Amino acid sequence: MAELELIARARRHASATALVSAAGSLSYAELLGRSAGAAAHLLDGKTDLAGARIALLLAPDAEFVVAQWAVWRAGGTCVPLSLQATAAEWDHVLRDARVTKVITSDSLTGRIRELCDSLGIGMLRTGFASGVLPEVAESRPGTLLYTSGTTSRPKGVVITHANVAAQVRSLVEAWDWSASDRIPLFLPLHHIHGLTNVLACALWSGATVEMLGDFDADRVLERVATGAYTLFMAVPTIYVKLVAKFDAAPAAVSAPWAHAFGELRLMVSGSAALPASLHARWEALTGQRLLERYGMTEIGMALSNPLQGERRPGSVGLPLPGVDVRLMDDDGQVIEAESQPGEIQVRGPGVFRDYFGREAESAASFDGSWFRTGDVAVIERGYYRIMGRRSVDIIKSGGYKLSALEIEAAILEHPAIAECAVVGLPDDTWGEAVAAVVVPRAGQQVPALPELRDWCRDRLSPYKLPRRLDIVAALPRNAMGKVTKPQVVKMLGEPAAPGRR
């Protein structure tokens, strides 16, 4: 029986360790066996799930991977849910994706049961059965990831098995993955960074993934010092936290960390801009020159500094294998000259199929076969450097791409706030910090930033909460009455300071 290539490749490494977690280790053979049994359980007598969307609300451990592979092998489409999301955010995803079942665990069932009951969606635990599994073509959808776009609500990105295979092949070639690699995973699994760059690349290669759950600097440093890993992938915020640990520790304590990090064959930073100062500081501490790359949910990774060769701070390098990249100016002309900014457009087998249920938005996102990323870059001495985004309504913070419009909508529910504009401000820790500028309702007093953040917690994930709050009499608007975001940024005048009102 023909199998998905990722599954077929796993059979080559049957006796090797695939996953390590607090619950123990799982070999590739055990992962294949458990996911086959779970797939048969999901089918429940059917011959094929026929692309049905199955949501996963699971901790980032071996059970998540078993469930993910089970959905794929049963012919379904995985919809990973953020563990940090609010009920309102889950509601949007479950409705928009037309999810039919949610696979969850005993510890998480209580958080989503009421919502599933109200939507008539059944909840499942990972079970086991026996039976014949369907043949699943690589062209079929395998994953539906939700990412914030220029609209106020997240869109579902349809990623086929062929898309994932192309993305993984490109990174395995560029970063020289092998079966001898060992990597920690502490990134969220509703995001392409953890799902593809770490988990899928490792399992494609026969490598070992140590699933650590949420990032814990002390635990990571302890494991790194033992020589547990060969690769390390993180967002800039995590490197900031690790640097703080180095700075707070005596030299005798930090020296083994520095040596162990220096022994890793590759360290990668992505999902947000890496400040040049942090790049230099990490190299000074560990001898490691971080590799920066560029990608997004819709395309996987497109650009990367080289594994062998110059890694330039502030640059995202060159097109990856199998990926075509071009810059387009505002007049629709391809940019040939260096140092001239243009929109990054990408094409290749890793580019997503479409936005789920959004035909018009999908069509508008492409220029023929080229995906319009909305990000602006220049080419300098052959390397791409990201300048920003065409849409000021997208904020990259702590590895997440956030919709300013979604955050504005939540803040505007506060009874004391009449108007709101949310922008991203440069921040060395987060890449960009969420800043909210609000106009009070007549006779009302806007709460201070800590109180507003507390009020928003039932409406927004923690990483979407504002880190700066400014209260103004009026927002800048153009002749058509639309808020001019560049003027909002200009009026703020300086990088965000946590806790500032």
Image (cartoon, grey):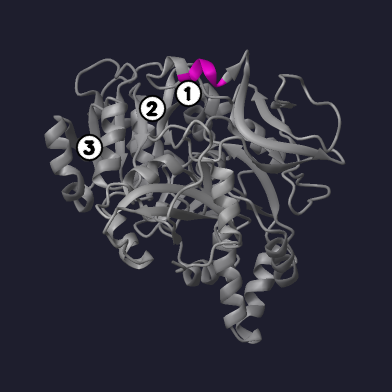
Q: What residue do we see at 61% from left, 86% from top?
A: 250
Q: Is residue 224 above or below residue 476?
A: below
Please report contact status of discs 3 and 1: CB closer than 8 Å, yes or no. Answer: no
C-alpha separation, residue under disc 2 versus residue under disc 1: 9 Å
Between discs 3 and 2, the one toward the N terminus: 2
Residue bounds of the magenta highlight: 361-365
Mark 2: amino acid: Trp
Between discs 3 and 1, the one toward the N terminus: 1
Between discs 2 and 1, the one toward the N terminus: 1
Q: Is residue 2 visible?
A: no
C-alpha separation, residue under disc 3 versus residue under disc 2: 15 Å
For residue 127, the mark is 3
User: Is residue 363 one of those drawn in magenta?
Assistant: yes
Q: Which image quadrant for residue 189?
A: top left
* Crowd tier of the residue under label 2, counting other residues whose Cα lies within 10 Å: few below 14, some 14–19, many 20 or above: many
- What residue would you read off at disc 2? 72
Locate residue 345, reporting x and y percent: 66, 26
- What residue would you read off at disc 1? 4
Q: Nearer the viewer, residue 218 or 41?
A: 218
Element type at marker 1?
A: loop
Q: What residue do we see at 80% from left, 47% from top?
A: 308
Please report contact status of discs 2 and 1: CB closer than 8 Å, yes or no. Answer: yes
Q: Which image quadrant for residue 284?
A: bottom right
